[in-house]
Image: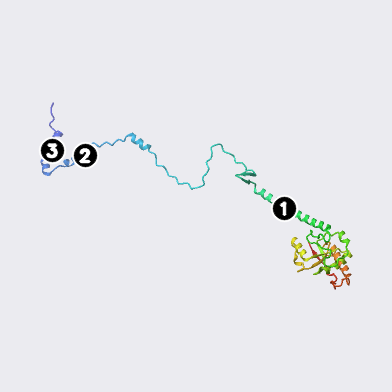
Amino acid sequence: MRRYSGQKALYEAMSRSRSKSEPKAKSKGPSLLERLRPQLEKLRRPKAAKPVVPVEAKESVAERPAPPTLKPPKPMGLAEPPTSPGPARTWLKPKAVQFNAGRIEVSLPYQIGIAIGLFVILILLAVFRLGQIDQKARYSEQSRTSRAGVDSPAAGTTTVDTTSSDGPAGPENTALEAGTAAAGDNWIVIARSELRKDLEPVMRHFNEHGIETGITTFDKLRRHFAEFGLDASALPRGDGYLLVTRQTYDNPDRSGTDGYAAKQKIVEIGALYKGKAPQGYESFAPRYFSDAYGMKIR
């Protein structure tokens, strides 16, 4: 095979150029290629393989539980009783009256409670009113059946004595025992004296003329007024005696009442007592009982 000699081979050219450059390189020092060779060797070295993580380790990391989340504490309150498991119970309306732990409990709407309270108040007022009516009727009945010297027109607390004790005894008056008292609330006071004996002739005088009278003391009147809650300021002070009618009348100061008529009759009969007072007794002149007045005793 014929060799073509017209052109130089590439390796020949490279070898010739290398041989020419060697003396120059020796004189000038290491070439650029030699200086870069360590770097090229580093690049040519195979890179270290990454360590393979075992599968079990990954799974253990994945299976590691997350840290628990902290919840804020609940405010302290009353402990609730544990609910017993079971079907839910419907709320039952409590009884009106029931016993619970030795106590009596009443469960009523407030409207019913108010109605019951008003009903009780009305009953108490009715009973009080009936008591007042019964008391007034009882006083009227006692005043009709009372006898002079035994009972007074005011429920027997104040006695009117028609007998004499320290003076001469007068004749027995049968009209006093058979008399009937009126149904009013007032006595008529005929005379007043510190000595009982001064009133005894006057009592006999009025009894003989049809006006039933009796003698009572200031002390008995005060006790009577205090017992029945009457005003005792109008009573005379000190000790003494009063001559009063045994019967009770309506207001003697009001015209047209039986008390007014009885008072006018007392004035007429009193005028007849002029000159009849025994010696040593008070004569009650010059009025002669014209100043008689009513006294409310109940």
The answer to whether the residue labelled 2 contacts the one labelled 1, judged by CB atoms less than 8 Å apart, is no
Please tell me which residue lies in front, 295 or 11. Answer: 295
Q: CA distance from mark 2 to mark 3?
A: 25 Å
Locate the C terminus and report the quarter of the image it occupies.
bottom right
Q: Position of residue 164 (x, y in %)?
A: 84, 65
| Residue at the spot of label 2 | 42
Residue type at tag 2: Lys
Q: Position of residue 171 (x, y in %)?
A: 88, 64
Q: Left or right: where does residue 131 sit relative to residue 62?
A: right
Circle nearer the viewer, 2 or 3: 2
Q: Does the rendering let one see residue 253?
A: no
Badge number at residue 124: 1
Q: CA distance from mark 2 to mark 1?
A: 123 Å
Q: Position of residue 57 (x, y in %)?
A: 33, 36
Q: Secondary structure at mark 3?
A: helix
Q: CA distance from mark 1 to mark 3?
A: 147 Å
| Residue at the spot of label 3 | 18
Rendered image quadrant of residue 129: bottom right
Residue found at x 69% / y 49%: 116
Residue type at tag 1: Leu
Badge number at residue 20: none
Residue type at tag 3: Arg
The answer to whether the residue labelled 2 contacts the one labelled 3, judged by CB atoms less than 8 Å apart, is no
- Vertically, is 134 above or below 242? above
- Sequence-wise first label, 1 or 3: 3
